[in-house]
Structures are given as structure tokens and as C-alpha cells.
Image (cartoon, rainbow, N blue to C red):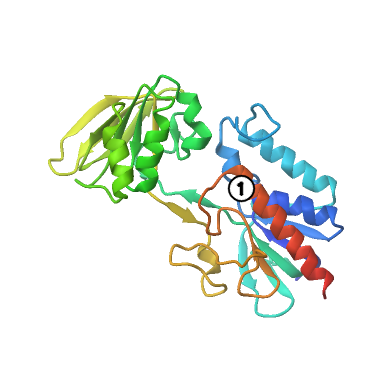
Amino acid sequence: MKKEIFDIIILGGGPAGLTAGIYSARAKKKTLILNEGTIGGQLAVSYLIANYPGVENISGFQLGKIMKNQAKSFGCKIKSNITISKIDFSDNIKTVELNDGKIYESNAVILAPGGKARTLNVPGEEDFKGKGISYCATCDGDFFQDKDITVVGGGNSALEEAVSLTQFASSVTIVHEFDHFQASDIAIKEAKENKKINFILESTISEFFGDISLKKVNIKNLKTGIISEKKIDGVFTFIGYVPNTESFKNKIRLLKSGEIIVDEKYQTNIKGVFAAGDCIPKPFRQITTSVADGTNAAIFASEFLNTL
């Protein structure tokens, strides 16, 4: 089996991983990014980004491509659409093996697998992601100026984001599966007192419809089973977040939520293994916060290597 040795291996090719690749390669560390999907992570499915500093607007695919090319320009090696079959962090030398038999070793690893918003998993949802369906009010709220939108969820995030979205939308309808909210009294009070917000409780969206963009949804009353059609310009879903850390269970310390526990230097409980981006605990998940995480993790990983 072919074996190749690097200074730093980065698992994940989203904003955090690509940024880590830029910084570590620029620091003259032999760097490899391994990504099981398309380079860019969630960037790749972001239709338009208008809040990235220094760039008025750009598609997520384009921004991811720029980051990828920048990392490669500093000598970072990138492999995408691969399948990792084995990971071993038990020794000082960390090992990653692919299903094609190739083995990569390094003294430091940065985990940047990212994560994803929990989805409803109903017909039409995949078709209209980025075309009327969003999972980030901060990212996409201003695209729905004077539009009628729906927010799905009943926790703090859903209610707080619904209130935030009233800055742009002409109306916001909150659809929640229970007859009560799992949110703070303050969040509930603010939502109920906002004249732009309406509520449909004990219900869920059962199907999405449209052409090139979302046009309407079916809302199912979970108590009666009755399905009603609602014309809508956009849907924001806030029903939880899932970090892509399943493959790291029993290898590093994780929170019950699946997020990777790190210290102030972005290092996990295993010496030489760092983590960055949406896979670690954080209050906000934005491209800019992932870029910051990737920067810090790469610098700390480089400092760690310099002590060996």
C-alpha cells in the first residue's frame, strides 16, 4: 500500500478546512486536505453570499473555488470525493487510510468536517435548498425583502430568527409541531407581540412545491391529519444542527450533541489533533466564524509542530 507523509492533514474541505490549508501551507508545512464530498462544504450549495467581508456578493461555489485555488497556490495538496476507511489517532504519528488503500501520515491533524442543519426530510426539500429554502436567517434574510415567509421550529433559534426576519419580510408564519414552544419566556413573548408574526401549531410542512424557486408548501396538521396548501416566498428551518462527527466517535471527546470538544488552542483531548469550524461548540455558525476557526487551528497546529 502506498504511504505518504505530511506535516498536517486536514479532514474537511469547507471554509474552515480550506482556510487552515491556506495558513498551514503558507507557513511552509507540508499540508494535505482530504474531503469526502465536494470541496467547499455547505458553501457549494449557497446560491448567493452577500455578507462575506470585502466581497459584495458571490456564489458559494465561486467562493469555495477561490479558497481552494488559494490553498493550492501555497502548495497545499487537496483530494476531494474520496472515502476514508480508517482513522488512527492513537500514536504520535496520526494515520488516515482511504478505501483505495492509500495511507497518509502526519504529526498533526485538523478536523474540519463541518455540519449541517437538521432537515425536515420531506418531498421537495432537496430541490429547493438555496432556491427558497434556507437554514440561516443572517445569511439570507435580506433576500426576502417584503416577502411572505415561513419559519419552521419552536426553540429559541426559531423564535429569535423569526423576529429578526421581520426586519425584511412583510409577514412571518411560524410552523411548529407542538402546541407549545421550547424557548425562553422572553423569546416567546417577543415573537407573540410582533404584529408581523403568525402561528400554526401542532403542524409541520409535509411537501415543498415550485418551479425554478419555491412557490408553495403543504402544511399538515399533526392532530387532525388535514393538509392545507399555503403560497409562500421562502422557508427558514430551525429544528436543530447536526455536526458531521459520526466517524470520530470513540476516537476523540465529543459533546452529547456530537460537537468536538476543544481547548483555547483548538486542540482536542488528543495531543496533535485540532478541530475547527461548525464541528466545534459555538454560538454562531457563519462562513466568517469558520474561517476564523481555521486560521486559529492552523496557527496552533503549526506552533505544535515547531515544538517537536
**Residue 22's x, y, as percent?**
77, 50
Q: Amino acid at mark 1?
A: Thr
Residue drawn at x 65%, y 63% as measured from the top left: 266
Q: Quadrant of the C terminus?
A: bottom right
191 to the left or right of 139: left
Tell me what residue is drawn at x 44 percent, y 38 percent.
126
For residue 303, above or below residue 212: below
Would you say 27 lies left or right of 123 here? right
Q: Quick check: 90 left or right of 205?
A: right
Q: Is residue 188 above or below residue 115?
A: above
- Comparing 35 with 156, the one in front is 156
Residue at the farthest right position: 28
Q: Nearer the viewer, residue 187 or 295?
A: 187
Closest to the observer, 163 or 208: 163
Q: Nearer the viewer, residue 111 or 227?
A: 111
Residue identifier under label 1: 289
Q: Secondary structure at mark 1?
A: helix
- Residue 220: percent from left, percent from top: 22, 37
* x, y percent for residue 244: 52, 57
Above/below status of 113 relative to 262: above
Q: Is residue 260 visible from the viewing direction of this image?
A: yes
Residue 93 at what x, y percent from top left? 74, 76
> Seen from this angle, which residue lies furthest top?
146
> Among all residues in the image, which is located at the extreme bottom?
91
Q: Is residue 89 left or right of residue 128?
A: right
Mark 1 surroundings within 10 Å by alpha-carbon count, few (fewer than 14), some (14 through 19), many (20 or more): some
Placement of the N terminus among the 4 image quadrants: bottom right
